[in-house]
Amino acid sequence: MIIKDLSKSNNMKFESLNKGDVFRYEGNLFFKVDSSKSPYNAYNLTRNEIDTLSSWDNVEYITSELILHSPDWEEE
């Protein structure tokens, strides 16, 4: 998987993000995995772990594109 940071970013509350949105919080890169009030609602791409953020946490939204490749894919 390759994540490209296209960096047209802005600050907003975590609750304003849509499921699947990529954002930066406390220096780590995340994507939102759940909109409910479940215990885990974000995936930390920097640490490769599921995490919990408060709906009122200020995050930096990052316009991004997620591209998934097959296991045998090689970058040219």
Image (spheres, helix red, strand yellow):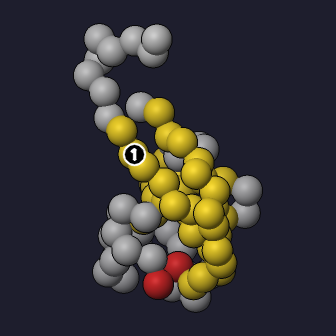
Residue at x-position 45% and y-position 77%: 17
Front-lying residue, 15 or 74: 74
Give percent across and percent down for residue 55: 51, 85
Asked if residue 36 lies left or right of residue 76, the reply is left
Give percent across and percent down for residue 35: 34, 77
Count of marks placed on residues? 1
Mark 1 packing: few (<14 Cα in 10 Å), some, or many (20+)?
A: few
Residue type at mark 1 is Leu
Give percent across and percent down for residue 31: 46, 58
Return the residue found at the far left. Answer: 70
Q: SS for tag 1?
A: strand
Rendered image quadrant of residue 1: top left
Residue at x-position 39% and y-position 45%: 66
| Residue indicated by mark 1 | 66
Name above or below for residue 40 compared with residue 4: below
Return the residue found at the far bottom. Answer: 56
Name above or below for residue 49 compared with residue 16: above
Residue at x-position 32% and y-position 80%: 36
Asked if residue 34 lies left or right of residue 3, the reply is left
Name above or below for residue 73 compared with residue 24: above
One can see residue 40 in this view: no
Residue at x-position 59% and y-position 43%: 47
Name above or below for residue 74 compared with residue 5: above
